[in-house]
Amino acid sequence: MSTEEVKALLEKYTKGETTDAENALLETWYIKHHHKPLLDLNEDKIEQDLNEVFNYLPKNQRVTNLWYRISAAASIILCLSLIGYFVTQNHTNTTVRKQKFAYHQDIAPGGNKAMLTLSDGSTIVLNSTNNGTLANQGNITIRKNKDGQIIYDLRNNNNTPPINAFNIATTPRGGQFQLVLSDGTKVWLNAASSIKYPVAFNGNERKVELSGEAYFEVAHNKEKPFRVVSNGQTVEVLGTHFNINSYNNNEAVKTTLLEGSVRILSGNKKELLKPGEQAQLQNGGFRIESVDVDEVIAWKKGIFQFKDDNIVDIMKQLSRWYDVDVKYDGNIPDRKFSGSISRNVNASQILDILSFENIHFRIEGKTIIVMP
């Protein structure tokens, strides 16, 4: 391929006019070199690598899906950057195409943010507090460790029973947080979520109340079952790893088991899950199906993971993570998206990727407007 052919191919790609084979060629080339600075590759090198990749691709891999392969930058940005590189190097007067959509404002991603409400009603902003002891409640010490986790330590030096009190950890939109309960159970809270739990687990059960989404790694205790109450259901476990998504604006409450076993109850209905299964509670009934658990807990690993999701469901996630409102101007676009994107990029970068499917966006303050 000559330089002119490469330029023409990149132009076709930005217009959506490339064939499956050409898509495979360009996207695989990018996957191979996306970690290298663009200007480190001269024209001859780019031509050589494109030809090498094309010859390397098996015939049955002419169709690729960029979403599954690139987790940060939009393909359109890549192609426009390459075109700009060729134009700059050739010192031509060609006008470089600008980014498909220009955003006068941008929105930074969320981070570790949470509020802790103590049993006396006082509050602690967890993301702005220093490490160390935060509060003492009875013979329980609440502290923040060097990793930013909230830890509950039981002091049994005087044989007094633990205090019978509750705390509430709440993440705002644009926040997430991790805490370790007094029994050693680890909890990761997603954005716009809250969990109410006892400072110490007295009695014959360990019960917490969840709103929103959380991932649990429950400390094993066969004498005290762990129960999570959330949006019309109760999940019972002895010690296991699972995820609950119970946002009020979702159609179903989704409980996904990664390890161990859980029993889910709602009214007079109950289900027992096996690892790799997800229970969806909707309209008073359960539906059980096998799922990719890595997709379900991608949020915990800093990734948006989509699988045939429509734009409304995607924007719900963006709204929670970027702390924005979403409005629709005109008919809601009928598109399905699959793939993964980093949660650590600005909102505009994700919107750029979505806009590649002919959906338009506008950012106005703390509102994203979706247009067909």
Image (cartoon, rainbow, N blue to C red):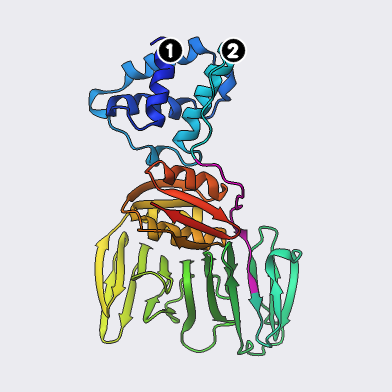
Q: From what the image shows, is residue 29 above or below residue 235?
A: above
Q: Give the residue at mark 1.
A: 4
Q: Main secondary structure of the magenta part?
A: loop
Mark 2 vs mark 1, CA separation in Å:
14 Å
Q: Residue 73 location, x and y as percent?
A: 50, 38
The residue at 45%/43% (across/down) is 353
Residue at the image point whose x is 23% and y is 28% from the top: 60
Residue 208 position in % (x across, y down): 49, 80
Residue 74 located left or right of residue 134: left
Dot 2, crowdedness within 10 Å: few (<14), some or many (≥20)? few
Q: Is residue 70 left or right of residue 138?
A: left
Q: Quadrant of residue 309?
A: bottom left
Disc tally is 2
Three-letter residue code for mark 2: His
Span shown in magenta:
101-115
Q: x%, y% of residue 145?
A: 69, 63
- Mark 2 or 1, nearer chain start: 1
Q: Is residue 270 above or below residue 249?
A: below
Quadrant housing residue 16: top left
The residue nearer to you, when weighing 12 against 131, is 12
Kindly identify which numbered label has been placed on residue 261: none
Dividing the picture into quadrants, the one containing residue 269 is: bottom left
Q: Is residue 240 visible?
A: no
Is 165 in the magenta? no
**Mark 2 residue element:** loop
Check the image and report above or below for 60 versus 55.
below
Task: Tell me which amino acid carries mark 1.
Answer: Glu
**Residue 295 shows in the view:** yes
Side of 134 where 71 appears, left or right: left
Q: Is residue 107 magenta?
A: yes
Local secondary structure at mark 1: helix
Badge 2 is on which residue? 91
